[in-house]
Image (tube, rainbow, N blue to C red):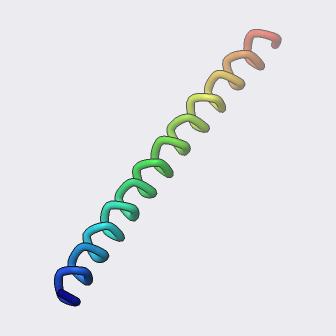
Amino acid sequence: MKNLNAEKEAKARAQIKAATEEQEENVAEFETEEALIDIRRLKRRG
């Protein structure tokens, strides 16, 4: 029983880690897009 719980916990931790990494990538992509938009706006203003 302990082994099964340890396996479930390890799987859950791996899923959390993967989700966290994906979320960090999404945030980085969003921030990059926001920065590009800001650059375009600044270029238009001259």
Say which quadrant the C terminus sits in: top right
Q: Quick check: 25 above or below 1?
A: above
Q: Position of residue 4 (x, y in %)?
A: 17, 81
Q: Is residue 3 left or right of residue 42?
A: left
Say which quadrant the N terminus sits in: bottom left
Q: Residue at x 42, y 57 (%)?
A: 21
Q: Quick check: 41 above or below 14?
A: above
**Residue furthest out toward the bottom:** 2
Number of numbered labels in the structure image? 0
Determine the image quadrant of residue 43: top right
Q: Is residue 46 left or right of residue 4?
A: right
The residue nearer to you, when weighing 42 against 28, is 28
**Residue furthest out toward the front:** 1
The residue nearer to you, when weighing 45 against 13, is 13
Q: Position of residue 15 (x, y in %)?
A: 32, 61
Q: Residue at x 82, y 11 (%)?
A: 45
Q: Position of residue 39 (x, y in %)?
A: 69, 25
Q: Is residue 7 left or right of residue 26?
A: left
Q: Quick check: 46 above or below 32?
A: above
**Residue furthest out toward the top:** 44
**Residue furthest out toward the right:** 45
Q: Residue at x 77, y 19 (%)?
A: 42
Q: Residue at x 61, y 38 (%)?
A: 31
The residue nearer to you, when weighing 11 against 31, is 11
